[in-house]
Amino acid sequence: MHPLQCVLQAQRWGPLASVSWLLLRTCRAHSGVPSTACPSSERQQEDGVRKDFSSRLANGPTFQHFLRSASAPQEQPDMEDPPPYLTVDELLGRQRKVYLETYGCQMNVNDTEIAWSILQKSGYLRTRNLQEADVILLVTCSIREKAEQTIWNRLHQLKALKTKRLRSRVPLRIGILGCMAERLKEEILNREKMVDILAGPDAYRDLPRLLAVAESGQQAANVLLSLDETYADVMPVQTSPSATSAFVSIMRGCDNMCSYCIVPFTRGRERSRPVASILEEVRKLSEQGLKEVTLLGQNVNSFRDSSEVQFNNAVSTNLSRGFSTNYKPKQGGLRFAHLLDEVSRIDPEMRIRFTSPHPKDFPDEVLQLIQERDNICKQIHLPAQSGSSRVLEAMRRGYSREAYVELIHHIRESIPGVSLSSDFIAGFCGETEEDHLQTVSLLREVQYNMGFLFAYSMRQKTRAYHRLKDDVPEEVKLRRLEELITVFREEAAKANMASVGCTQLVLVEGHSKRSATDLCGRNDGNLKVIFPDVEMEDVNNSKVKVRAQPGDYVLVKITSTSSQTLKGRVLCRTTLKDSSAYC
Ligand code: 5AD
Ligand code: SF4
């Protein structure tokens, strides 16, 4: 028999489109652990489990079973109705300890909380101590080669830990979750035999089953991408009780297909979470006392809730002027402006941010809303990627430098004092010195407050991989990146200087990492503000002096700035509503 036994399986709780696959391999031949390393009693036990498992698999579900159950609506796996080859008991965590490690973007931070919420419901416990973990899960990123290399290195370190634990009663299980699992699929299982499970970004509901399969010494994978999974009903677990802010995922995937980007391949098609479930989550966070939510997605402002028939009219989408899409124009659905409006009404003391948007989706109604609502932060991330229209065309971004600059002017006119940030890629395919200088000049022209700059990293599957040549030498990419960073810092320092002497509203996060006598918080533009931890007046009760606590709003007079931080003197404790007159 071929060692790789593939079972094509439709997800029990998924729609018909959700045909998942499960990779099962026997421990001895493929775990990478020499069979002599298994103590014999354990081996016998494993043989027993394997036989039991194989017989159950043989008597297991038919293809018809999957077709039947595949049309059921998406819901949490039902613990009382496990897959035919597993018992209810095997699906339970039985207090095993899970250690979760997150790499990459904020989406991954949110995914970690979703994965944990699912495992917690199954009876797993969470540990922050790697040494006592029974299960280690790495939530991974594939956006650049370097991000993946970090994971490979980490796996090598974990190998030693796993080998040490081979003789223990509960062997250590290791899982790769997220984008890297999706991109590399079985290549990970082949290269790193110590990896027990793979779960792509849309397969976290399947974690209890994957871990149950892994318990029997098999490798298990579900890297199915879904057209409708948004984890709408999974309330992420807030991991830090003292946190002042939280991320709320509003949509997943991306349809833009920028030519350099792996995201559409690792996170799949764009889909939005129903408005009602987002509002419910934000309400709960407000009740818990959180003071800031960031609406999260690969393309937040392309949000479109078409979950109910009455939302689906024939009204087509308003794009920013001079912008186009790589996909067929979409129609109908509740759009981002509607969501932002509703979210911002929940709690006037709760700050609202969103990331990451695409510049094409900033119609006037979104800008107007940001301008008029006190609790929507006047901060916009506007990823430009390049300042050269020629490169933007090769990147398939759907706009020229001129359209982008016009949008910047329009945003600044619509939202005076708005704080702007951007992403840039240095050394994309075919980028000449002249193109690079265009990016330098865009950085100078816009003078962003924050920037995220990267050297181009060719990713397989992307359009650039198939159609373009990664022809900018590595050292040139790095030199250009350095130049962009220098220019960005100079300009940000100038932009931030303008706030010296201004009074800003700061949401206190806690003590500064550098000094126990200072507090640290964020201004409306999301810049870090440091100020001495001293007693101050409370605007609502002038008789008492107070010390600011995490979650308090304070007014700070800015006294000095750098390219990344502001420093100041605290004036008083206040509320978001009371402070709007100052900003
Ligand atoms: N190489 C370098 N940077 C990339 N990004 C996306 N794909 C790549 C790549 N292949 C950057 C873009 C994007 C940010 C999240 O990561 O700037 O906006
Ligand atoms: Fe990638 Fe472009 Fe989608 Fe952003 S918008 S995730 S860069 S494809």
Image: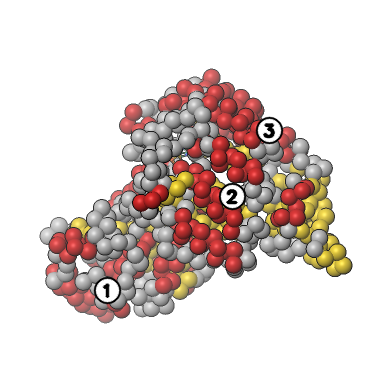
Residue under the point 65% across and 32% down: 413
Q: CA distance from mark 3 to mark 1?
A: 59 Å
Of residues 358 and 142, which is closer to you in this image? 358
Residue at mark 1: 81
Q: Earlier in the sequence, mark 2 or mark 1?
A: 1
- Please, what secondary structure does the residue beneath circle 3 have? helix
How many badges with numbers are in the image? Answer: 3
Q: Are marks 2 and 3 in contact (CB under 8 Å)?
A: no
Q: Which mark is residue 353?
A: 2
Q: Earlier in the sequence, mark 3 or mark 1?
A: 1
Q: Residue at x 71, y 46 (%)?
A: 565
Which three-letter amino acid code belongs to the residue tagged 1?
Asp
Q: Mark 2 or 3, which is nearer the eye?
A: 2
Q: Is residue 284 left or right of residue 62?
A: right
User: 471 or 118: which is nearer to us?
Assistant: 118
Label 2 vs label 3: CA separation?
23 Å
- Where is residue 263 drawn, in percent x and y? 40, 44
Residue wearing tag 3: 491
Determine the residue positioned at 45% across, 74% down: 125
> Residue 141, image x and y in percent?
44, 49
Three-letter code for the amino acid on which mark 3 is drawn: Glu
Q: Earlier in the sequence, mark 2 or mark 3?
A: 2
Q: In the structure shown, which secondary structural element does the residue marked by tag 2 occupy?
A: strand
